[in-house]
């Protein structure tokens, strides 16, 4: 180890990234809750209003990501590995984008009644977002909180596994419920985007576990 690397262990690392992660997590949490409401809403005006609110969250999340890059380029010592700092922010942004994609599918396909399996998948996205928000709040003290963070990451993985099962069974049932071809395509689009959304938060939990394992 070089002398410079040795002394870096004693230099305080920047903590300014944590508030940005927390802002991202707050927008994700709000958007996931709104998405769940969209799947229950039957009034088209309210549906459009909820979709606009989710778009606001996604747009604000993009602004946070831009701020994140500005801070990253100006920082010498990050709180953990530089590549991990960047990848975690990108993954969180992707999760928010997937929620926005789901909202767009719900609105444009004009779903006024959805199956219980789909609402359960939306529940899983909302619960995973809540867990993620708690994890991010604990990150400034991740060494002390690693056991709890790992537990919450495992809960996210469990939710993702449940959605995987729901996705598989839903696809198999689509062709046995007497739906028209148009309705099958619409529902296939929705279940696929919900599955992609759940996968994206599972990748975040995997990344966080990887980060903690290096500390």
Image (spheres, rainbow, N blue to C red):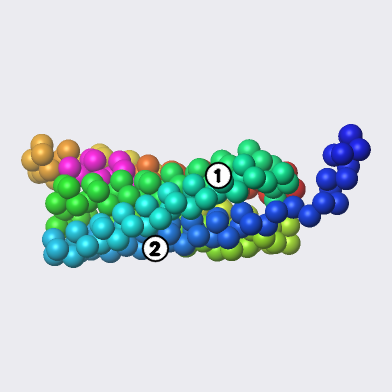
Is 169 on the left or on the right of 185, as rendered? Answer: right
Q: Residue at (87%, 39%) from the top-left corner?
A: 4
- Does 143 sit above or below residue 211? below
In magenta, the rendered stretch is: 186-194
Is 147 on the left or on the right of 111, as rendered? Answer: right
Indicate the secondary structure of the residue bearing disc 1: helix
Rendering quarter of residue 112: bottom left
Residue 5's mark?
none
- Does 47 sit above or below residue 180? below
Residue 32 at x, y = what percent? 37, 58
Viewer-closest of 116 and 71:
71
189 falls in the magenta region: yes
Tell us which disc is closer to us: 1 or 2.
1
Q: Residue at (19%, 61%) from the top-left corner?
A: 47
Q: Residue at (70%, 54%) from the top-left corner?
A: 14
Q: Distance between the residues labelled 1 and 2?
A: 23 Å
Residue at image mark 1: 69
- Does 82 sit above or below residue 49? above
Q: Which residue reaches farthest top?
A: 2
Q: Residue at (54%, 60%) from the top-left corner?
A: 22
Instruction: State whether residue 198 appears in this view.
Output: no
Please tell me whether the stretch drawn in magenta is mainly helix, strand or loop: helix
Residue 96 at x, y = what percent? 41, 50
Mark 2, other Cα within 10 Å: few <14 / some 14–19 / many ≥20: some
Residue at image mark 2: 30
Mark 1, other Cα within 10 Å: few <14 / some 14–19 / many ≥20: some
Instruction: State whether residue 65 appears in this view.
Output: yes
Which image quarter is the N terminus in?
top right
């Amino acid at each position: 180890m070089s002398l410079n690397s040795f002394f870096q262990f004693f230099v305080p690392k920047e903590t300014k990234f944590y508030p940005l992660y927390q802002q991202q997590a707050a927008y994700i949490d709000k958007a996931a809750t709104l998405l769940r409401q969209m799947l229950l809403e039957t009034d088209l005006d309210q549906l459009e209003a909820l979709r606009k609110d989710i778009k606001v969250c996604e747009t604000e999340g993009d602004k946070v990501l831009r701020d994140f890059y500005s801070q990253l380029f100006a920082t010498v010592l990050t709180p953990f590995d530089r590549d991990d700092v960047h990848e975690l922010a990108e993954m969180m942004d992707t999760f928010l984008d997937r929620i926005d994609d789901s909202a767009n599918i719900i609105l444009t396909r004009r779903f006024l009644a959805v199956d219980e399996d789909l609402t359960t998948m939306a529940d899983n996205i909302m619960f995973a977002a809540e867990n993620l928000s708690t994890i991010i709040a604990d990150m400034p003290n991740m060494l002390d909180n690693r056991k709890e963070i790992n537990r919450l990451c495992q809960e996210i993985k469990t939710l993702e596994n449940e959605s995987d099962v729901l996705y598989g069974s839903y696809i198999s049932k689509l062709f046995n419920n007497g739906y028209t071809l148009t309705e099958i395509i619409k529902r296939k689009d929705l279940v696929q985007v919900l599955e992609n959304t759940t996968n994206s938060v599972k990748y975040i939990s995997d990344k966080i576990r990887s980060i903690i394992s290096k500390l």
